[in-house]
Image (cartoon, grey):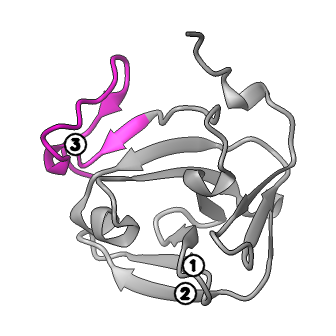
Amino acid sequence: MTEPADNRSASYPKTASCLCGGLTATVSAPPTMTHACSCLDCQRGTGSAFSYSAFFAEAVVQTRGELRSYRRTTDSGRWQESIFCPTCGVCVLTRLEALPGIIGVSVGCFADPGFEKPEKLWWASRRHHWLEPPPGLETADTQ
């Protein structure tokens, strides 16, 4: 079995979509960084064992459709905003106070199994015990 190609060299634009297709985000350039996070808030926010996000310069992201947002304060005291479809509830975008001018896109919303792997797993100390980080993936116990 061959490994998927690194998506940094793949063609753009690419479009991410919620489950019902009501909210889309089209990106015209590769991400500046890609990571996963196993903090408890990401687990609750995704309903899964971790989040998997690609971060893009705000200038290369265009959204279409109705959206809602939820802002919370993180353990660091800074805000994090989840932007989701009001119809199906899927979180498509994330904004972080710590990353002005950058927008995170939930990688699963691209529905592209060849999308590049995360560069880092944040909050590895809170990962589910069965989740072993792949060889070569940098981990951080906190953030």
- Magenta residues: mostly which secondary structure? loop
What whole-number distance in Å separates the C-alpha atoms at marks 3 and 1? 24 Å
Task: Identify the residue at horizontal 34%, vertical 66% (top origin).
Answer: 47
Instruction: Please say if the residues under marks 1 and 2 sit with CB atoms less than 8 Å apart.
Output: yes
In the rendered image, residue 120, in percent from the top left (x then y), is placed at 40, 36
Q: Is residue 26 left or right of residue 131?
A: right
- Provide the residue designation for mark 1: 83
Confirm whether the magenta stretch covers residue 130.
yes
Q: Amino acid at mark 3?
A: Ala
In the rendered image, residue 45, in percent from the top left (x then y), is placed at 37, 71
Q: Amino acid at mark 1?
A: Ile
Q: Is residue 54 left or right of residue 67?
A: left
What whole-number distance in Å separates the C-alpha atoms at marks 3 and 2? 27 Å
Secondary structure beneath dot 1 equals: strand
In the rendered image, residue 87, in percent from the top left (x then y), is placed at 62, 88
Magenta stretch: give its range.
120-143
Q: Is residue 36 left or right of residue 88?
A: left
Q: Is residue 72 above or below residue 109?
A: below
Q: Earlier in the sequence, mark 1 or mark 2?
A: 2
